[in-house]
């Protein structure tokens, strides 16, 4: 679906994207994570042909970007950075203008003029805006603008959705609605490419993540694979002292009554402890959270500007 | 895309306000003149105003002369300056481009809608000027005295007013092209419009400066008033031809530059 090879973008002396090799497969729910200013948005703009690469190659839907964007983009729905609309027009008029601006007529797939009204209605329905009136968009709340932006992305029933911070400005209820919408679209065959700095959002929606840090793709893998294979078992027991003595040398760390034990098989470990008469309150394979994985490979975002350390006197 | 741009242009309150203002200024002048009957001395700026008291049918020409130096260029520079920069600052530029709209198509559609605006604005000034002139002053459309003496028939007068409208519109396209070029450079619509106006003001100052006479024939505003020669009998074509040539060069050069810049530009707005 999306492949990039050694993709690099420099703005003057600043390297915003540095030798990135993305690999998004058909049907993926791909989450692009990274601190603020790490190059996520520039990467999204490169994929959509808004910004031209300094070097490297981009392929989206099996065709090169930016050479064939005219053929690619009709099948792509996008939300870049923040939603936008003409403030003096109402929501429906905005969607109609946007749809009319794109290619139409035979060969343009879902872009036909005849179906425009129906497609606008359907897109608004999906994002929970079917009841909007003739109010101009300038009077919309942040959440309504976000929903309208999503509706614009869905207008042409795209095969690939590229969404930058899709739940920005939504309340918890709205976030959940949009998450369900994205999951149902994906189940119907739409590939999702989300960029976000919200770990929980990506963790709940995505099956695959890429992590960018200072313009470099430092990690790209399936979430399931990232989180298994620690080889550790977490045990909570009121008899922690006896357990430490019993499991001599295999306890990696201890925090009160919680122990991290190096062991391959939780079931055997449990049998061992209980066989020795220890009371086990909780026991299970220890998985790293996505947060720990991401924090271990990234540095502070570019919005944190710290000066030289002040010497102690 | 052209239809979309036209809808956007005409659904914008600003378009109507600027047209209203363009019509209002000559109307104000006409009312003052009609009430007081104090005309400027013949030969003073704005052109034709002295002649209007004698024959109101000339007021369309006078109205054009009134809005030409400032009002019309301002209105056109605002529309031209808004073309790309306005979309960029509202954030819609990226959404139009990923729809997808080809960058060249977008620029051409903007150029087309700006041309339509210029034509509508100039025609509105001329038509409202005629209505005002005929109603407020003594009017004899069949016996207008030309600038150089012999009188013009009604048919001649209409033809010449139409030609003047065309000439003023072409002159304004020069301003519009400069504004559009600046609009592709900046993300600020205001900055682009003011930039284009700054060029016009600088040019108008240099035109009056004798020390700058070597560059004078190439200044964009040098032949702006050449359409007055259309109302001579016989018509004096020399300056009109030069004016059209200069404007054509400005339009082609600045639109070319706008296209070259926009087609290869990183859209980061």
Image (cartoon, rainbow, N blue to C red):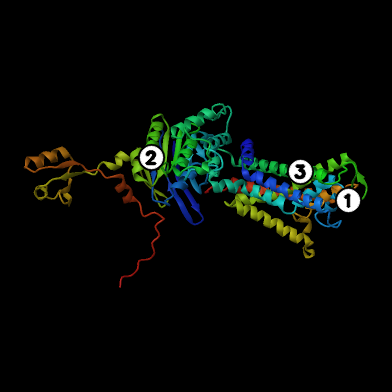
In which chain is the residue bearing label 2? A
Mark 1: secondary structure: loop
Q: Of tags 3 and 2, which is closer to the observer?
A: 3
In which chain is the residue bearing label 1? B
Residue that protrudes farthest toward the front in the picture: B35
Q: At x 50% / y 36%, what residue is drawn?
A: A152
Give the quarter of the figure containing the C terminus of chain A: bottom left
Mark 3: secondary structure: helix
Discs 2, 1 touching: Cβ within 8 Å? no
Look at mark 1 in the image and give the residue it sits on. Answer: B147
Work out whether residue A311 or residue B131 is closer to the camera in this orientation and state it. B131
Distance Cα–Cα, label 3 vs label 2 = 55 Å
Give the quarter of the figure containing the N terminus of chain A: top left
Q: Residues within 10 Å of mark 2 (few under 14, many from 20)?
A: some
Q: At x 33% / y 43%, what residue is drawn?
A: A200
How many labels, in total?
3
Q: Residues within 10 Å of mark 3 (few under 14, many from 20)?
A: some
Position of B262 compared to B28: left or right? left
Q: Quadrant of residue A290?
A: top left
Mark 2: secondary structure: helix
| N-term-proximal mark, 1 vs 3 | 3
Discs 3, 2 touching: Cβ within 8 Å? no
Look at mark 3 in the image and give the residue it sits on. Answer: B128
In which chain is the residue bearing label 3? B
Look at mark 2 in the image and give the residue it sits on. Answer: A175
Q: Quadrant of residue B2?
A: top right
Q: Position of residue A215 (x, y in %)?
A: 42, 50
Q: Of tags 1 and 3, which is closer to the observer?
A: 3
Q: At x 38% / y 44%, what residue is drawn?
A: A210
Q: Position of residue A223 (x, y in %)?
A: 32, 40
Q: Is residue B158 above or below residue B174?
A: above
């Amino acid at each position: 679906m999306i492949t990039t090879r050694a993709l690099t973008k420099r703005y003057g002396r600043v390297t915003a994207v540095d030798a990135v090799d993305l690999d998004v497969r058909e049907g993926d729910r791909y989450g692009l994570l990274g601190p603020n200013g790490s190059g996520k948005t520039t990467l999204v703009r490169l994929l959509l042909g808004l910004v031209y690469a300094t070097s490297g190659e981009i392929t989206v839907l099996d065709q090169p970007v930016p050479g064939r964007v005219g053929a690619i983009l009709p099948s792509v729905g996008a939300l870049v950075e923040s939603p936008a609309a003409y403030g003096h027009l109402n929501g429906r008029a905005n969607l109609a203008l946007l749809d009319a601006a794109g290619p139409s007529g035979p060969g343009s797939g879902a872009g036909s003029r005849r179906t425009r009204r129906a497609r606008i209605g359907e897109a608004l329905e999906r994002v929970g805006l079917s009841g909007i009136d003739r109010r101009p968009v300038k009077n919309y709340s942040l959440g309504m603008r976000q929903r309208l932006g999503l509706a614009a992305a869905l207008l042409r029933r795209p095969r690939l959705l590229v969404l930058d911070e899709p739940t920005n400005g939504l309340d918890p209820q709205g976030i959940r609605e949009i998450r369900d919408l994205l999951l149902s679209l994906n189940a119907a065959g739409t590939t999702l490419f989300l960029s976000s700095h919200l770990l929980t959002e990506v963790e709940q929606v995505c099956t695959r993540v890429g992590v960018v840090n200072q313009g470099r793709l430092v990690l790209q893998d399936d979430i399931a694979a990232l989180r298994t294979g620690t080889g550790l078992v977490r045990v909570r027991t009121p008899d922690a002292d006896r357990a430490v003595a019993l499991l001599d040398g295999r306890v990696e760390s201890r925090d009160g009554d919680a122990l991290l034990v190096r062991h391959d098989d939780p079931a055997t470990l449990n049998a061992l402890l209980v066989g020795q008469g220890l009371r086990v309150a909780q026991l299970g394979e220890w998985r790293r959270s996505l947060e720990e994985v991401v924090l271990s490979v990234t540095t502070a975002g570019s919005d944190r500007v710290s000066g030289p350390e002040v010497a102690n006197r | 895309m052209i239809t979309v741009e036209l809808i956007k242009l005409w659904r914008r309150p600003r378009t109507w306000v600027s047209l209203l203002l363009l019509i209002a200024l000559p109307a104000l002048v006409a009312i003052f003149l009609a009430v007081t009957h104090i005309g400027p001395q013949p030969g003073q700026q704005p052109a034709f105003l002295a002649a209007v008291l004698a024959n109101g049918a000339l007021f369309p020409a006078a109205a054009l002369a009134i809005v030409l130096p400032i009002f019309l260029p301002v209105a056109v520079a605002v529309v031209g300056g808004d073309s790309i920069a306005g979309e960029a600052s509202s954030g819609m530029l990226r959404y139009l481009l990923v729809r997808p709209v080809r960058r060249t198509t977008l620029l051409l559609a903007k150029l087309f809608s700006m041309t339509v605006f210029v034509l509508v604005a100039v025609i509105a000034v001329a038509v409202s000027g005629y209505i005002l002139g005929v109603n407020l002053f003594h009017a004899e459309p069949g016996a207008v005295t030309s600038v150089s003496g012999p009188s013009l028939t009604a048919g001649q007068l209409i033809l010449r007013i139409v030609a003047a409208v065309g000439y003023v519109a072409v002159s304004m396209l020069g301003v519009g092209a400069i504004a559009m070029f600046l609009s592709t450079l900046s993300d600020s619509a205001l900055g682009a419009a003011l930039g284009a106006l700054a060029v016009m003001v600088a040019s108008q100052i240099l035109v009056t400066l004798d020390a700058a006479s070597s560059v004078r024939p190439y200044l964009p505003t040098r032949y702006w008033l050449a359409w007055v020669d259309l109302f001579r009998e016989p018509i004096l074509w020399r300056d009109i031809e030069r004016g059209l040539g200069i404007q054509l060069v400005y339009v082609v050069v600045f639109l070319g530059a706008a296209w070259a810049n926009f087609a290869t530009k990183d859209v980061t707005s």
